[in-house]
Amino acid sequence: MSGARRTLGYEATPAFHIPLSFFLAATLFGVGAGLFLLFHPDALDSRWTPGALALTHLITAGFMLLTMLGALLQILPVVAGASIPAVRPVAIGVHALVSTGACSLAWGFMAGSPAALQAGGGLLGGGLLLFLGAAVLGLRRSEASQTTGRDLRIALIGLAATAVLGILLVLVLSRGLALPFAFGPLITLHVAWGLLGWGGALLAATSWVVIPMFQITPEYPRWLTRFWAPLVLAVLGAWTAFDLLGNELPAWAGSMIPMALTALFALTTLHLMRRTRRPNPDASFRTMQLAMACLLGGALCTLVAILRDEAFWPLAAGILILHGGFVSAITAMLYKIVPFLAWLHLTQARIKAPHMKKLLPDLPMRRQLRLHAITLAALLGAAVVNWNGATRLAGALVALEFGWLAANLLGTVQRWRLTRQEAG
Amino acid sequence: MSTLTDLMTHDHRQCDDAFASAERHAGRGEWEAARGALELFARALCTHFDAEESILFPRFEEATSMTHGPTQVMREEHRELRAALGRLQDALEARDADEYAGEAETLLIMMQQHNMKEESILYPMCDRRLHGEREDLALALGQRLAAGEPAEVAP
């Protein structure tokens, strides 16, 4: 069997339960983050509280990382022609290491436990090493030559940089590792690589393809798709080299270009989405628009946070970028990916599959996405009023939102299972 | 270097426009207009598949000796897409708006993941492996596509 057939054919598609196990576990991290906020409302006092750090990593290393890795296992063969070797054992290993690593890291922040922090860093590092190793092997055999394939590689470089910086930070915090460069900028670099170099580049690489094709919009401008991700890589690389060589940049100078790049991506996407030729944009389309607006708002809050001292601005930036931006975009995509995978696996098994809207009805999806938007407003409100009651309410809504997302995805799985049973 | 990729990708987008037009009319309950638009889409889609299966894929298979390779996968997906198109036409005949919306969503996602594979992997492979004859091939494909392409997609 040829290499190209391996990547293009159904054989390249991992079994349904592989990406699904990543997605469902990810929702549990979201529920965990909500419950944590419910019982530790002081986490939102500032971005530096142990609770805020735990919360951030439950969302980034838990929800976001797991869904992104699960989705990559699915899409690398399709859009980048990469055939992941030994996909099943790799997926099981990555899932186990990243899940336990994210739990341990969050626990380490919460409890101030150096051992848990180290275990978390080690497990996450091991999981990412395994994933990146398999992805690099797969991509080496790839014949794809398109922008998206290149930008996915850039995102993987961003993931590796985020992990290395994160492990250095864990070693500084838990073992007092002495570094030849300042600690503060290292945190900023870890955040910048994680949100822009990894998350942003992955979102952009996906959007270049998904927005025009699935929403039937005009293409992104060619200059943007050609230069955006390499520019992100170059800017973050130069910023990192500058900082690590001891020439600490003023915060505004380091942040300005990444924020401008984020705003450029978000504004272009919003502009394209306004020109969709599909009728009656559905709830997932609206949620994607919300994601882009929040990324834009988050970039603005990041700039204001540099100029002003109030604790609200960095919190608002974090809430807008993480919950408003990434959680929105990921949730909107999950609502397309999971029913399609259920449909694909049924069809490939020669079973007559119900159509997408029977596998995932509109109504529960629309209601869950509405709750997601309300939760975002509640989180921002809690950051403004800084009152425990408001934060507890926001936490309860976060838990409910992710629980509902899990229930909707499980509903699709249940319909997939019933269809299989009925077909004998 | 990307003659075939550009040509065939452009035709995918033409098909998308026809699909969106049919979906818009069906969404408004304009069933007669939807029927006309869906016919244009079906013709554009089937012409595209026909051009690939009768011109592009055989040349690729000949040049690479890969008869059980990516082109076979694409042929299988064409068969599934034709079946999905049939279900969409049935929903239109029944004037069932919910059924049409569900079948349209399914067809769109299936079609776009198929297009994604062609545009990012198969067409660039064709441009590389058929480098010497890609101008002639593009001409032949262009003529075949033009013969079945809707002249203009109704807004």
Image (cartoon, helix red, strand yellow):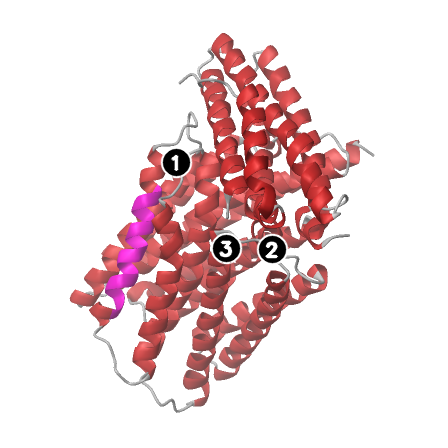
- The segment highlighted magenta reads A254-269
Give the numbered dot on residue A218.
1
Give the numbered dot on residue B39.
none
Instruction: Name the mark nearer the viewer: 3 or 1.
Output: 1
For marks 1 and 2 on the same chain, the one whose residue lies earlier in the sequence: 2
**Amino acid at circle 2:** Glu
Give the dominant element type of the magenta stretch: helix, strand or loop.
helix
Total numbered labels: 3
* Residue A367 appearing in the image: no
Element under disc 2: loop
Q: Same chain for the residues at labels 1 and 2, yes or no?
A: yes
Q: Quadrant of residue A318?
A: bottom left
The x and y percentages for residue B141 are 58, 31
Look at the numbered discs 1 and 2 and tell me whether their residues touch, using CB distance below 8 Å: no
* Residue lying at the far top of the rendered structure: B32
* Residue B92 appearing in the image: yes
Instruction: Name the mark nearer the viewer: 3 or 2.
Output: 2
Residue at (66%, 40%) from the top-left corner? Answer: A342
C-alpha gap between disc 1 and disc 2: 26 Å
As for residue A261 lying within the magenta part, the answer is yes
* Residue, disc 2: A143
